[in-house]
Image: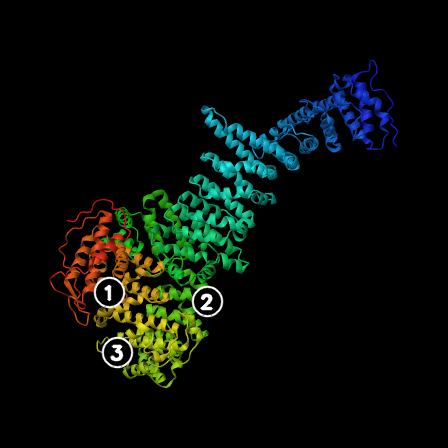
Amino acid sequence: MHRLRFKENLQANGISASALRDRLQRLHEELKEIGQGDLDTSQLDPYCQELIKPSFIRHKDKGVQALVACNLADILRLYAPNAPFSQAEIKILFRFLLAQLVSPSEGLANADHPLYKEAVYVLDSLSTVKSVVLICDLPSAGDLITEYFQKLWALITEKLAKNVELAVIDVLVQLIDECVTIPQPVVELLMSAYSQDPHSPTYMASTSICQATQDRLQKHVARYFSESFLETLESNDDDDEDDKVIALEQLHQQIVNVAEAAPSLLTSVVPNLESELHSDRVHVRLLATRALGTLFALSSNVSEGFATLHSHVWKAWLGRAIDKHAPIRICWTEFAVKTLTQHSELVSAITPILAARAVDPDEHVRAKLAELIYNLDYDTICHHIPLRIFQELAQRGKDRRATVRNRALDALGRSFSLAYAESGSASIFADKFAWIPGAVLNCNLTGSCDVTRSVLHTWETYIVPPNDPSYAQRLHTVTSLLDDNERSVFFYLTNLRLSRPTALDVYVECCDGKDSSRLSACIQAIAAILNDPDVPNVLHSFANEPDEFLLNSMRVCFDPSTPLSKSTQTRHEAISYMQEKLPEMINVLSECLWTGSFPILNVSCIQPLLELQSTQLLRFIAQHAPYLLKDYSGILTQRALDEPVSSLALDLLASLAAFDPTSFSVSESFVAYLTKQATRSYAAAKLISCISPDLVAQQVTYIKELLEHESNDASADVLEALAAFLDYSSVEHIPSLDTLVEHILHRIVLAPWPNHEPELDTEWIDDDSMPLPLRTRLGSLRVLTQWCCVQKKADLVPPVLKLLWILLGTGEVHRDQHIPLGVRSRLRLFAAQCILKLATCDAYASLILPRMGRLSYALQDECFQVRMHLLHDLLLYLMRDELPTEFHAAIFLVAFDPEDEPRVQVASYTRRLQVLPPIVRHERLERIIVRFLHLLAHHPDLNAESPQTLCSFARYLEFYLACVACETNIGVLARFSACVRTYIDLSLSEPSVENSRPLYAMAELAQFLIQRLADNHGWTIYPVDEEAPCPKDILRSTGTIARSVLDGEVWELLQQQPRRHRDKKTKVA
């Protein structure tokens, strides 16, 4: 045991303050070196009695007081856990120690004071020895504890040393842990810190204290908030309503801050918030939604306990997702996403409700969801956001509101971009993100130019950015993720399908003053391409005062030789320029810049795509923009020699040769190589036809010999080569094929199917999966069709047409052929495509038009791929003006298609026709109503005696009117429909008025729907003097109107159909 060396009395008569400080210092130096339990504390009893006397603790010398405090702290340490003082003395002692700590001059707040280290020593002793808990045993401990909290709390500022702050916090934590009852002022003090800046020292100190004493504080915090809410809400002072709102906001913000700092403190507070969720006051519900959302979204395990422990509150909070006020739904959405990202166990409860916010009636809610997903990091997007949320956002890419649409598409695009950069896990990328580019492209099917702008922005910013160093590789990868329909949209957006020079190139020339007479026509053509009603006015205004900077930008972008990087930079600089100089024209002119340029597939992409063997992209370029291949003809020629016969390079060269045979030169050795391959290679035959036509006759003769001796299965490549010769050679180079045609017809087309393969009994067979016998049959039909197109003899085509009509209906000539289901689908489609091809020849169009209905009904084939491919080809021929205008009547038969895409394509096409010159539009859209009614009258599903069937056919006419009718042509449509009742149907076996009843039924139905449409829109139907069309191949005029054939039941059913409320009274002049 240690023997105390200090033997002096602390107090002596006449002792100076300096001497007293010296004695106290020596005592303190010795005591602080003695460990607990190493001293017989009885040796200190005299000093204890002295030091507690007022003469010491109230000594006028501050140095003496500081050393007294240090010695008392040492004594408390050495006597611990007891104290050598009475309760009254303990109270005096701790008040004295507190005074030393908080003294403004020499306390903890003034680190520069000489006595600062003594104050720190005292504080450290209280913290480490825990002697401060002696306060808790006093009868009036609450007052002293409150005093300690209030005075020490005032010390916590940014200037307080970190170690001192931690010691202060530790002392306060000890007081809360050991006191019998926590004083309410202490709770209020702690909670008041959560009304301050989260970065303030008191806020952080309160957080540390609350986290350390959560179990002790929990019920006291609950009582604090309960009393505070009660006091605020039950206030009867109407004049202070604003103050009441502010107080509520502060209380809820306190709860939010407490939740983030020490969430378990609020376990008993949560039930009180549930009642607020059902309050009549919007502001109260909003505050409660935010507060509870913070609790549920916390990342700690406590948050999971909130949802589980308070299931009723959780369900009530979920109900705020459909609150009638949008700000509350926005708030709920924000915290639902946060909760989703933190708690996988709550995904099943949140996902359906959160997904419904994507279709919320308020655009701000829809936009908020997209914004929240956009701002998430990749790990969160990948592992915490369900696929359903992304799928709902994809639908918002078609939203009418630009803010919602842009945010949704950007959220999808950014998610894909992040996933693409982190696509180490191929399975996650494929399952969750690979579909996004296609979904973005599908939004463009709405036909809205505003949606197109949003799609293009997302594509260029996130999906395949042009500034990506591996642009071609990324483009190749992304396009490989698309299905056929999505790829069609992608190819459309590349602008390569536009014939060059485009109307936009002509427009630039007109603005340069080279040929202003073409200005109006080319503006109408541009309006048809862009499908934007603002185009004519903007382009006329710009042409009147052209801007040279923008014109030069257009020249650069429209030049096919401009590299992608330069084209993109020029376009973006032009857009920035327009934002400043021509903001009112920016939408239209930016569309022109995109549409006239090569923004996706560019000349600078050819080389890397060749290295990647990107077959789909390169074949598309070869088909629609072979001029981009000119600079690579030498490379392609060498590759064709080095690679197999079916090489991609040979196909690309063939397309380039068909576009411009003089664009490249070939060696004799290459021609010799082509000659060897031409009998079994479509591309080689195409090349020879274009660059060496004098060799065609020899090659075709040799092919005839091959076909007469080879088996059917070995004939596919040979037939394709022969089709190439027929397609790309002039008639004088083709020898007679009459005997070969008979051979093909009987030995291949009419032959039974060689063997049954179960995998072919599917609805459709893709190109890559076509068996050899199917390729042979398709090649035969192609040869027969091409032969007819080459000869252009009306007496040659009937047998071929007869065969094609049969195949169009059933996919086989007779049932004994036993052709599999998938093969029949391909044959039906190809038969329809061949008939369309023949209809482009003037010599055969008159033979096909009277039976156009049979071809048109193929647009309702049971196989979706047949319908879509045929519609695509039909629209392509119509856009190129290669078919008689009467074929426009067929496209409206897609009205009943179970998929939206066919109707969207037809609607988009008709919108483009609306901006054409009136004569053209009239011919293609309005006059064809007569033939359209004839098609409907002969539809195999029509039963003119069934009122229900007749009413169902209204859907065809409603679709037609939705695409065509407007205020200016409604009278024309009404006139033409009425005149149909004066015709006789000549396509019947026995033409008569009585037998023409189905035709009259359709005409009456059209009249009714036209009248109803005019009534709904408030249009006036003026009389029209124009003579109605009467196609002589199908109709004959009688000069008298047939009586009505629709009975009362039909009219009653039609009246029961839903109709829109009229805007204003319709006038019939």
Q: Residue 313, relative to residue 84: is it above or below?
A: below
Report, in whole angstroms, how far the alpha carbon at label 3 lies from the one at label 2: 42 Å
Looking at the image, tell me whether mark 2 or mark 1 is earlier in sequence order: 2
Residue 269 at what x, y percent from top left?
57, 36
Callout 2 amino acid: Gln
Residue 772 at what x, y percent from top left?
41, 77
- Which residue corresponds to mark 3? 799
Work out whether residue 796 can be spotted. Answer: yes
User: Of 603 and 798, which appears nearest the observer?
Assistant: 798
Q: Residue 844, relative to residue 908: is it above or below?
A: below
Report, in whole angstroms, how far the alpha carbon at label 2 lies from the one at label 1: 46 Å
User: Of 77 and 893, which appears nearest the observer?
Assistant: 893
Q: Quadrant of residue 294?
A: top right
Work out whether residue 517 can be spotted. Answer: no
SS assignment at label 2: loop
Q: Which mark is residue 935?
A: 1
Check whether the beta carbons of the residues at disc 3 and disc 1 lie within 8 A of each other. no
Q: Residue at x 19, y 48 (%)?
A: 1020
Report, in whole angstroms, how far the alpha carbon at label 3 lies from the one at label 1: 24 Å
Q: Residue at x 28, y 73 (%)?
A: 805
How many numbered dots are placed on residues in this image?
3
Residue at the extreme bottom of the image, as rendered: 709
Q: Which mark is residue 600?
A: none
- Indicate how the structure is coloured in the image: rainbow
Callout 3 amino acid: Pro
Label 3 environment density (alpha carbons within 10 Å; few <14, some 14–19, many ≥20): few
- Which residue corresponds to mark 2? 613
SS assignment at label 3: helix
Q: Nearer the viewer, mark 3 or mark 2?
A: 3
Residue 609 at what x, y percent from top left?
44, 64
SS assignment at label 1: helix
